[in-house]
Image: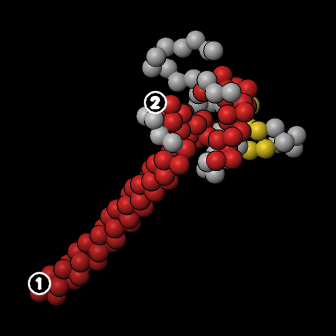
């Protein structure tokens, strides 16, 4: 196992892909468990290179660590963990949509205020 400080993540920001053996060491899960979870949790989708070797991304690692916590620490069943992951993804999706809507409505409000300002300046000019 790689030695690290408690607050230090074993997942490198620079690395794009990790092989199954590396993921096994980082997560503390055996490769057959990783393959099984891949079949159970459809959200785990490692890239398969031409040699069909699994290459996991950072988001896959984060998800595996989240699933491990749900199953091993919080006592969820596989079915319960699937529901929890699905609910978390939906909540994250809704949050992203809200942020996008807020950004769009902010732009729309800015455009609306600019149009009103121009209209008021036009009326002011007519009154002078």
User: Helix or strand or loop: what does disc 2 sit on?
Assistant: helix
Camera-side residue: 39 or 21?
39
In this rendering, the answer to whether 62 lies above or below 96 is: above
Q: Is residue 103 among the parts visible in the rendering? A: no
> Which residue: 52% across, 24% down?
9
Q: Quick one: label 2 or label 1, which is nearer the N terminus?
A: 2
Rendered location of residue 15, percent (x, y) = 66, 31
Rendered location of residue 47, percent (x, y) = 74, 44
Q: In this view, does 60 lie to the left or right of 128?
A: right
> Which residue: 54% across, 14% down?
4
Q: Which of marks 2 and 1 is in front?
A: 2
Q: Is residue 58 among the parts visible in the rendering? A: yes
Rendered location of residue 22, percent (x, y) = 70, 25
> Which residue: 34% across, 62% down?
102
Rendered location of residue 72, percent (x, y) = 50, 31
Estimate how packed mark 2 is, as few (under 14), some (14 to 19) or many (20 or more) residues with alpha carbons within 10 Å: few
In this rendering, the answer to whether 74 lies above or below 86 is: above
Q: Quadrant of the N terminus?
A: top right
Badge count: 2
Estimate how packed mark 1 is, as few (under 14), some (14 to 19) or many (20 or more) residues with alpha carbons within 10 Å: few
Residue at the right extreme, as displayed = 51
Q: Mark 2 points at which residue?
A: 73
Q: In this view, does 41 lie to the left or right of 99?
A: right
Q: How far apart are marks 2 and 1 (CA)?
A: 74 Å
CB under 8 Å between discs 2 and 1: no
Q: Is residue 26 left or right of residue 118?
A: right
User: Helix or strand or loop: what does disc 1 sit on?
Assistant: loop
Q: Which of the labelled discs sits on residue 128, or is there none?
A: 1
Q: In which quarter of the image is the C terminus?
A: bottom left
């Amino acid at each position: 196992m790689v030695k690290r400080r408690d607050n230090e993540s074993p997942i490198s920001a620079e690395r794009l892909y990790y092989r199954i053996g590396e993921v096994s060491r980082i997560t503390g899960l055996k490769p057959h468990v990783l393959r099984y979870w891949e079949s159970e949790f459809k959200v785990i989708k490692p890239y398969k290179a031409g040699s069909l070797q699994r290459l996991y991304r950072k988001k896959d690692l984060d998800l595996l660590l989240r699933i491990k916590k749900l199953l091993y620490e919080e006592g969820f069943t596989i079915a319960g963990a699937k529901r929890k992951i699905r609910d978390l993804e939906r909540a994250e999706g809704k949050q992203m949509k809200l942020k996008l809507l807020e950004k769009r409505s902010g732009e729309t409000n800015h455009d609306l205020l600019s149009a009103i300002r121009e209209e008021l300046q036009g009326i002011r000019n007519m009154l002078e």
